[in-house]
Amino acid sequence: MNMMTAQPEPAVLPSQRQAHVDFAAPDLPVMLPGRPDMRYDLPKAWRHFKLLVKDKEDTSQVTPIFEALPWRGVYDAALAFLKTERAQEIRRKEPSLVKILDDHETLRKLPAGSLAHVYCDFMEREGLSAHGLVDELDKNRPAHMYWEDQVTWYFNRMRDTHDLMHILSGFGRDALGEQCVLAFTYSQQPSPAHLFLGYAGGLEIRKHPVKVPVFRAVREAQKMGKACPRLVEMSITELLPLPIDEVRRRLNIKAPSYYNQAHATWRAAGIDPYDLMAPVAKAA
């Protein structure tokens, strides 16, 4: 007698719960009830940080750190922005930055030298996609932590502008560049987790025998992020066709000094900043 075993239904990912939502809809609720309070949980943050130190490749430890050290004013910031006509105009034009940013064929039709072209060059060179950040969060975020409202749209933009911050700030995906982007992002989206991880990563980099101004670079990045208007609240489709230097001028982003100085010092010593941790391991 044949028995058919019921197969478990596949887990529903948070991003799949969003697939049917029209984030440009005029009647989309601003903020639904039931969202958790933004509270600090220092023991949780420290516990996951220690696990991350043991295995720096274990990115599953990063999301819990952000959950434990959240931007406590994020709801107020989102609601204040969403009340403006400018926000509603951007929401109508840009319901999903992922779809806009991953459409390289369309972006390549914009002028050469534009932010769009620099973005495509960066993402293709690094083997990245905007949807890759969605996938990364799907690994670690419970499916029920999702609301069909405009605040979710705002949160999605905080996620989707990460690589644009790399490009506009001039900080690469090397070890120091990642810490600098965390500090830059802290001034844009002040979750203590950004600053905590940025300076903690800086401590690791300082172990390298060739000394460079690590903390000056991180602090400079923090100041750069503060001088820049909040990128999540800018119209990205208005910025993409512009020359990248013009975008940086409009956003008050100047070239980083200490970060570039650190790279120059490392390269003069025959060290590739993008392979920095290998020499550290050998020196230990």
Image: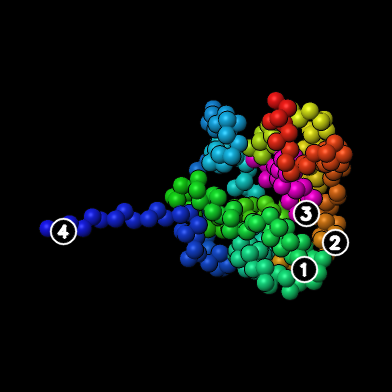
x 64%, y 56%: residue: 128
Horizontal relation, residue 246 to residue 57: left or right: right
Quarter holding the C terminus is: top right
- Magenta extent: 166-192
- Quadrant of the rendered structure where residue 193 is? top right
Which mark, residue 2?
4
Query: Sequence order check: which comes first, mark 2 or mark 3?
Result: 3
- Looking at the rendered structure, the kind of residue marked 4 is Asn
Secondary structure beneath dot 3 equals helix
Query: Sequence order check: which comes first, mark 4 or mark 2?
Result: 4
Secondary structure beneath dot 4 equals loop
- 4 and 1 marks in contact (CB < 8 Å): no
Q: Position of residue 247 (x, y in %)?
A: 81, 60
Label 2 belongs to which residue?
A: 246
Which mark, residue 168?
3
Query: Sequence order check: which comes first, mark 1 or mark 3?
Result: 3
Label 1 belongs to which residue?
A: 241
Q: CA distance from mark 4 to mark 1?
A: 62 Å
